[in-house]
């Protein structure tokens, strides 16, 4: 008859505890392990970029503004004034192109929309330049829109 000593049980408990700590320290809620990005900067950028883009798509520019770099917020709000009456039909975002140092990224997003004065759908392309300050995961965007002149002339 085999009996387990308390030392074997303690070792098993200790091994389970070590594995749980390691998995929790390197993983995230999705269960991924990001050894090359232990601070989840790319994951955080992807989330911020998606939230910001959805706010723009729904013409909720006041909420989108919170993602915009502080020194660019007035310019952003000025650019988006022309989009206040727009009805967005869809959008498509390129993959996030993050640089190796994880300090900056560029994303191009294409929005399709129309207005009451011009029922023809047009495309607006937004170039999002994302940066982060310091070692934190707070990303901010500098945004430029191409095609607003076409909308303004209608």
Image: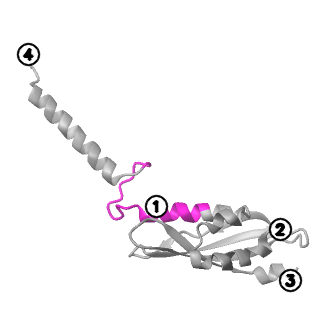
Q: Is residue 128 visible?
A: no
Instruction: Report the residue marked by disc 3.
Output: 153
Q: Quadrant of residue 69 in the image?
A: bottom right
Q: Residue at x 32, y 54 (%)?
A: 26
Q: Is the C terminus in the top left, top right, bottom left or bottom right quadrant?
A: bottom right
Q: Residue at x 82, y 78 (%)?
A: 151
Q: Is residue 40 above or below residue 106?
A: above
Q: Residue at x 58, y 70 (%)?
A: 94
- Sequence-earlier tag: 1 or 3: 1
Q: Compute the Cα span from label 2 to label 3.
A: 14 Å
Q: Compute the Cα span from label 1 to label 2.
A: 33 Å
- Sequence-earlier tag: 1 or 4: 4
Q: Could you say where residue 10 lies in the image, as x and y percent from the top left?
A: 14, 32
> In the rendered structure, which segment of residues is drawn in magenta?
29-51
Instruction: Report the residue marked by disc 4.
Output: 1
Q: Residue at x 35, y 54 (%)?
A: 33
Q: Residue 85 got which mark?
A: 2
- Sequence-earlier tag: 1 or 2: 1
């Amino acid at each position: 008859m085999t009996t387990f000593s308390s030392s074997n049980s303690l070792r098993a408990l200790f091994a389970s505890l070590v594995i749980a700590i390691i998995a929790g320290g390197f993983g995230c809620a999705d269960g991924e392990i990001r050894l090359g990005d232990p601070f989840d900067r790319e994951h955080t950028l992807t989330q911020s970029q998606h939230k910001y883009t959805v706010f723009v798509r729904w013409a909720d520019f006041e909420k989108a503004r919170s993602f915009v770099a502080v020194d660019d917020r007035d310019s952003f709000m000025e650019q988006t004034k022309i989009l206040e009456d727009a009805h967005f039909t869809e959008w498509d975002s390129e993959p996030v192109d993050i640089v190796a140092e994880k300090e900056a990224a560029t994303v191009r997003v294409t929005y399709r929309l129309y207005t009451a004065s011009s029922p023809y759908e047009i495309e607006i392309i937004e170039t999002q330049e994302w940066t982060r300050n310091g070692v934190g995961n707070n990303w901010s965007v500098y945004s430029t829109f191409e095609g607003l002149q076409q909308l303004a002339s209608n």
